[in-house]
Image (spheres, rainbow, N blue to C red):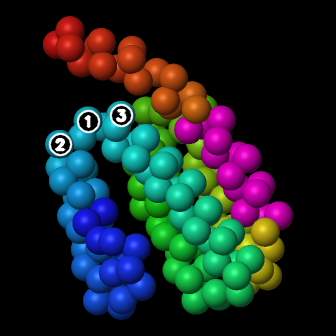
């Protein structure tokens, strides 16, 4: 964000650039609504899959593994961990099962270097991400009415 293309090739610049990005994300999280937080989780998941795919294609297996660990963390700690299985009924139960399946497929993708599994995970999450984004205006309107 604050570095030139030449500086981004330098390890220290990449390290600090990551720090600024992390601070930016933490700042967004601190002021985000619950709806926005879930949208950020979906965005982070999709970004992690894209990074993993690129690293896999380039043979950077350590980077692929790190990106897939991040994706699994988002699914397990963010999306699945945020479900209220008692009050959420069938929808929460179905999402819980989907998130479990995603965790298995992401783990398999990592172990087998399986790009098709990454594609499948992305295809499964995309409709959820799109549906969540489509209700943003309704959520803002409801929040404004309070």
Q: Nearer the viewer, residue 142 or 119?
A: 119
Q: Residue at x 58, y 68 (%)?
A: 51
What separation in Å lies between label 1 and label 3 (alpha carbons)? 5 Å
Which corner quadrant of the image does residue 84 belong to? top left
Q: Nearer the viewer, residue 89 or 57?
A: 57
**Magenta span of residues:** 116-129
Local crowd size for mark 2, using a 10 Å CA cut-off: few (<14), some (14–19), many (≥20): few
Number of the front mark, 2 or 3: 2
Q: Main secondary structure of the magenta part?
A: helix
The residue at which mark 2 appears reads as: 31
Local crowd size for mark 3, using a 10 Å CA cut-off: few (<14), some (14–19), many (≥20): some
Which corner quadrant of the image does residue 26 belong to? bottom left
Callout count: 3
The residue at which mark 1 appears reads as: 33
The residue at which mark 3 appears reads as: 35
What separation in Å lies between label 2 and label 3 (alpha carbons)? 12 Å
Q: Residue at x 36, y 90 (%)?
A: 11
Q: Position of residue 43 (x, y in %)?
A: 48, 49
What separation in Å lies between label 1 and label 2 (alpha carbons)? 7 Å
Q: Position of residue 128 (x, y in %)?
A: 60, 37
């Amino acid at each position: 964000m604050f570095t030139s293309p030449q500086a981004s090739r330098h390890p220290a610049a990449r390290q600090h650039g990551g720090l600024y990005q992390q601070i930016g994300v933490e700042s967004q999280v601190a002021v985000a609504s619950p709806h926005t937080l879930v949208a950020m989780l979906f965005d982070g998941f999709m970004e992690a899959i894209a990074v993993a795919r690129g690293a896999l294609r380039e043979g950077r297996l350590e980077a692929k593994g790190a990106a897939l660990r991040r994706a699994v963390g988002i699914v397990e700690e963010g999306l699945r961990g945020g479900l209220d299985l008692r009050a959420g009924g069938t929808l929460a139960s179905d999402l819980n099962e989907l998130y479990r399946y995603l965790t298995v497929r992401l783990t398999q993708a990592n172990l087998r270097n399986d790009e098709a599994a990454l594609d499948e995970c992305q295809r499964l999450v995309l409709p959820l991400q799109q549906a969540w984004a489509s209700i943003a205006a309704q959520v803002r309107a409801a929040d404004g009415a309070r």
